[in-house]
Amino acid sequence: MTQALTLQVNGAVATITLTQPEIRNAFSDEVIAEITEAFRTAGERPDVRAIVLAAEGPAFCAGANLNWMRRMADYTREENIQDAGLLAEMLRVIYECPKPTIARVQGDVYAGGMGLVACCDIAVSADHVHYCLSETKIGLIPATISPYVIRAMGARASHRYFLTAERFPAAEALRIGFVHEVAPADELDARVDGILKNLLSASPNAVRAAKRLVQDVAEREIDAALIRQTVEGIADIRASEEGREGVQSFLAKRKPSWLPG
């Protein structure tokens, strides 16, 4: 176990907190397994009626960690498919969790971390936070997280931020609908508590059914075919010439070959 998170239950609220601020709460395959298990556990507990996803430190989640990226740089296409499938399963478990979920975003969010926020039903952000779909900067695409991120921010905003990989502030995340509320850092907990109060005052069965209703009705179903498509999409580009060059140049802290020297 990496001890990358804690799961605490206080009354009817479970809080899953990412606890590796020294690496900006970045993913590895081990961390993905822990997050998946934590959401399964909290989602199945009868005493839990809502789940908060939080993090420690200056970043909420910076995507893949460097050691994991180093391993991925040498993966075959089949290994990439298996690897991306674990990330896809984590995202599915969060998105389909039977309990309402809130992302409490206290710090910056990059790449795969955007998927964590997008998979939660509600997102509340500190006003100093920046967001970034950074994948194209290193020759990749945000394929596995795309079904959830596009649902959260819409296709029009996704066209811009998927392609440019530019950072954007919390105010822009609010404007495009990626987050529901933005607050000063010292008011973040109060805003989350206000949402929890409303969730806990509603019928548990109705909340669960309402969540399922949105997922059933909104746009295309995230089914096995779509997940497979996104898994293959990231595997193909990871194994491509530019994908390998982008990751290797990032790890070596040099410019990728497509940038002028």
Image: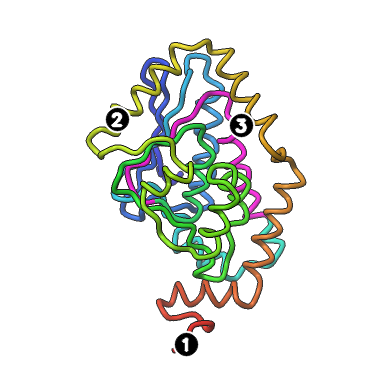
Q: What is the image's colouring?
A: rainbow
Question: Residue 57: image x %, image y %?
Answer: 29, 47
Amino acid type of the residue that numbered disc 1 sits on in the rendered structure: Pro
Frontmost of labels 2 and 3 is 2
Disc nearer the start of the sequence (3/1): 3
Q: Secondary structure at mark 2?
A: helix
Q: Nearer the viewer, residue 111 or 39?
A: 111
Find the distance from the CA under tag 2 to the CA under tag 3: 24 Å
The residue positioned 49% from the left and 57% from the top of the image is: 133
Farthest right residue in view: 225
Q: Secondary structure at mark 3?
A: loop
Q: Which residue is mark 3?
A: 96
The residue positioned 43% from the left and 35% from the top of the image is: 180
Looking at the rendering, the stretch of residues picked out in magenta corresponds to 82-108
Q: Which mark is residue 260?
A: 1
Amino acid type of the residue that numbered disc 3 sits on in the rendered structure: Glu
**10 Å crowding of disc 1: few (<14), some (14-19), many (20+):** few
Q: Quadrant of the C terminus?
A: bottom left
Question: Residue 257: image x %, image y %?
Answer: 52, 84
Are circles 3 and 1 on residues that touch, CB within 8 Å?
no
Frontmost of labels 3 and 1 is 1
Q: Which residue is mark 2?
A: 189
The residue positioned 47% from the left and 55% from the top of the image is: 63
Disc nearer the start of the sequence (2/1): 2
Q: Examine the structure image and report whether residue 107 is included in the region drawn in magenta.
A: yes
Amino acid type of the residue that numbered disc 2 sits on in the rendered structure: Asp
Q: Nearer the viewer, residue 237 or 87?
A: 237
Find the distance from the CA under tag 3 to the CA under tag 1: 44 Å
**10 Å crowding of disc 2: few (<14), some (14-19), many (20+):** some
